Image: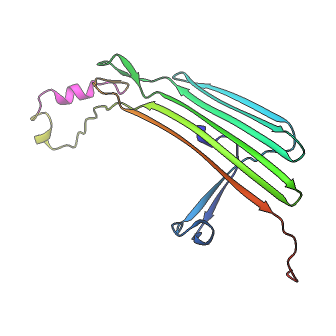
């Protein structure tokens, strides 16, 4: 998915993890880590096309700026045309347009100190899937053909990729955030082994 671009690793931690991750992790936890900036110039891009006009893209640029400052940027997108025809509104449904950006800076002012700052932005827009009629042959006779004559035949004649609805079920979200970590190697403390 577009939100899972440029991942370094995914850790699945079983059992209670309350000490490290808080009191509501009784069943375990997942730790998802983004790739941090590296010391070498690097770039990559991928493009994938599929049915229903689906186009997925991913791009990454790792850019070292100085010997103590490095950056990494990535973008991913997914666009899909709708594949359910709404004959009432003369439009297609179940499309998707999503894009996500991730940026990271790594600052190393000392050999023993590393500061990582990351930020993301994502926008997702989709129009929902249409409702379809499905006939259940085990239904009570009181709720079937006796209640609405011709209902069984009409339902069986519908196409699951066509709907007639005067509605537009939309889903749209936008999220962003900034976070960071500081790693400081303080060396040996006392006679600890």
| Residue reaching furthest to the front | 109
- The quarter of the image holding the C terminus is bottom right
Q: Which residues are magenta?
A: 148-160
Q: Residue 62 vs residue 15: left or right?
A: right
Please provide percent x and percent y for residue 97.
52, 28
Residue pictured at 59% horizontal, 69% vertical = 17
One can see residue 57 in this view: yes
Residue pictured at 54% horizontal, 24% vertical = 51
Indicate yes or no whether the magenta region holds residue 152. Answer: yes
**103 or 98, nearer to the observer:** 103
Please provide percent x and percent y for residue 49.
61, 24
Image position of 17 with respect to 104: above or below: below
One can see residue 1 in this view: no
Please provide percent x and percent y for residue 160.
35, 27
Colour mode? rainbow
Please provide percent x and percent y for residue 76.
64, 33
Indicate yes or no whether the magenta region holds residue 121. Answer: no
**40 or 10, nearer to the observer:** 40
Q: Residue 126 vs residue 74: left or right?
A: left
| Residue reaching furthest to the bottom | 191
Image position of 76 with respect to 181: above or below: above
Image position of 143 with respect to 117: above or below: above
- The quarter of the image holding the N terminus is top right
Counting labels gives 0
Residue 169, quarter of picture: top left
Residue 166, quarter of picture: top left
């Amino acid at each position: 998915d577009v939100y899972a671009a440029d991942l370094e690793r995914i850790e699945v931690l079983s059992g209670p993890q309350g000490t490290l991750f808080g009191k509501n992790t009784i069943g375990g936890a997942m730790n998802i880590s983004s790739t941090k900036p590296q010391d070498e110039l690097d770039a990559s891009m991928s493009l994938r096309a599929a049915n229903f006009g689906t186009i997925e893209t991913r791009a990454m640029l790792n850019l070292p700026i100085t010997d103590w400052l490095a950056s990494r940027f990535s973008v991913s997108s997914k666009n899909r045309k709708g594949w359910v025809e709404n004959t009432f509104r003369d439009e297609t449904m179940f499309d998707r347009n999503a894009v996500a950006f991730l940026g990271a800076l790594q600052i190393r002012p000392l050999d023993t100190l590393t500061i990582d700052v990351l930020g993301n932005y994502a926008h997702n827009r989709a129009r929902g899937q249409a409702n379809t009629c499905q006939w259940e042959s085990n239904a009570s006779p009181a709720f079937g053909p006796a209640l609405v004559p011709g209902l069984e035949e009409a339902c069986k004649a519908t196409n699951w990729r066509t709907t007639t609805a005067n509605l537009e079920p939309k889903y749209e979200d936008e999220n962003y955030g900034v976070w960071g970590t500081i790693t400081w190697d303080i060396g040996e403390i006392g006679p600890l082994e």
